[in-house]
Image (cartoon, rainbow, N blue to C red):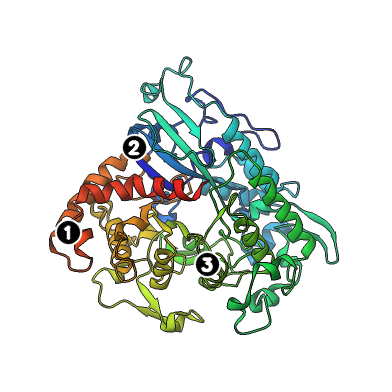
Amino acid sequence: MYSDLHCHSFLRSFERTDPGTTPVMSPNPCDDTSVWHKALDAGDLTDMEHAIGFIGYTQADFTDVSANNGALVVTSLFAVEDGFFELRKGVVSAFLTAIGMKNLLEAFLGRLISKFKLEQIEYTQNMVYDYFDVLMKQVNFMMNGPKAPDTSSCADALYSNLPGVQYEVVMPGAVAAPGAQNVKVLWSIEGGNSLWTTVTGTSSGDWDCRNFDKKNIKDAVAKYRAIDDPNYRNLLSPAMISAHQLTELIPWEVCDQVAANLTTLKNLSSRPFFITIGHHFYNGMVGHPSSLQPLTGDTKVFGIKLHLLDQSFGCNSDITNLGWVVINEMLQDANNRILVDVKHMSIISRQSYYAFRKNNYPDVPIVFSHGAVYGASLQHGIYTSNADIINNTTDDQAGNFYKHDVNLFDEDIKEIVLSNGIIGIEFDKRINGVKAERSDNDLKPDMIWHNMRYIAELANTVIQPAQSVWAFISLGTDYDGIINPMPDFGTADRIPMLRTMISGLLTTYLATTTAINNQDRQMGADAILDKIFFQNIIDFAAKYYK
């Protein structure tokens, strides 16, 4: 049995349906529009896939997920950002535009990287593409799809163990451990852009999530403060947000429409468990960190820096008036609450949210659904520039962690622990700190383990006596999220092998460490891994998804 705080089980099957229609999931696992469909080439990576770091085969299809003798997954839905299929502006982009080839080349590059259906990519590039409409189609695809596979017309031996297996979308207040032939599904949203519909007739024209760079707000985004006061983080209140008493960056008409879309989601029979408000590109809500290094030129592929995509607009900015409306709308009703996932928020946005939560919603836990640790703290506990980053020199693995602020600083980890929150460990090689020059033969689960260990040891410095340092750690694989997973652990059916290998590392650690308290050392490897691999998410969801 296992639980996963963040995966994309429905993404591949949905993206293989015909765009612009009402997508229907196939019950036949041999069809690629079935959530049970398993890619035949899983685990066989090309040199290009290794180098770029994005994999096309399915990793969390329900055939692999159900191989774990029961699973609970939080599957993330989202409308793909069109920025993912838009080349960085420059000489090459201008030339391709001039000869009428830009959109076509973008679509083919997107197909190469994501393995999405070409027609879906072209639809994403079309101005009729409506983010919230696409999100709701995904929701219906998941909610109304056939819950059990039909293998009667599928003779492939890959699916011989499926008869009797089914998935179930969990309703609020009904979270429980899954049965042996059951995949329980909660869902989340990754990217606040998915809440947008085009809003027309505002004082500054029509607004949708793809035209921020045409609104001449770049300087305002970089300097934005919700209130013109240096202490703005501690002054913000729900009443001020509801009364629109914040600096207006995004028109309030837009904020009202997005809030109405959130209300639609909250009124569903199964609402989102949490929303990851940021994602890869600016959405007018929160700043985002750089996260697509192989494609933005921050790292080399075959010795060449690929300046293909541009994440710079809005990168590392703060929460806007629209962002605060979204956050407050998510949290204000304790009986119908959607939690905030701070993954893909810039460190500046994360710190603004931490202060607001602590001052106004102190009972709300912080979610970090998928990622790993940075291995550094911040001078005075606050980030103002990279000069504030103090690398950990006492932990012998800290230098191996992935040093980008898409990961967690020590202060982030402590905030999450103090809020009784939860962290999902992502299975992407880069995010885990696995260096590209290491051969696959060397890629054992040591970095996954060291990320877990680092979190536990920091938790030990702030937990209450009755708490366990292991209670805040879970799996957040990001399977099927266009990641480059650890070799040997590229698909969900390999989870039991990962647990076995980490068990050896954990057993050795418990016998020698003095970095955690006696109670947590004496718990034993099996009990600890039960918590990390499935029980923590089940307990967390049972408490907060009501």
| Lower position in the chain sequence, tag 1 or tag 2 | 2
Q: How far apart are marks 2 and 3 (CA)?
A: 31 Å
Determine whether label 2 and label 3 are within 8 Å by CB: no
Q: Which mark is residue 510?
A: 1
The answer to whether residue 245 is left or right of residue 9 is right
Q: Given the image, on which type of amino acid does mark 2 rest?
A: Asp
Q: How far apart are marks 1 and 2 (CA)?
A: 27 Å
- Quarter-of-image position of residue 300: bottom left
Q: Given the image, on which type of amino acid does mark 1 rest?
A: Leu
Q: Distance between the residues labelled 3 and 1?
A: 35 Å
What residue is at 59 percent from the left and 72 percent from the top?
317
| Lower position in the chain sequence, tag 3 or tag 1 | 3
The residue that mark 2 highlights is: 493
Confirm whether residue 122 shows in the render: no
Q: Which of 59 and 73 is in front in this view?
A: 73
**Residue 143's spot in the image, x, y percent?**
58, 34
**Residue 389's spot in the image, x, y percent?**
41, 79
What residue is at 41 percent from the left and 60 percent from the top?
302
In the orientation shown, which residue stands out farthest toward the left? 511
Q: Residues within 10 Å of mark 3 (few under 14, many from 20)?
A: many
Question: Helix, strand or loop at disc 3?
Answer: loop
The residue that mark 3 highlights is: 289
Question: Helix, strand or loop at disc 1?
Answer: helix
Q: Given the image, on which type of amino acid does mark 3 rest?
A: Pro
The answer to whether residue 252 is left or right of residue 517 is right
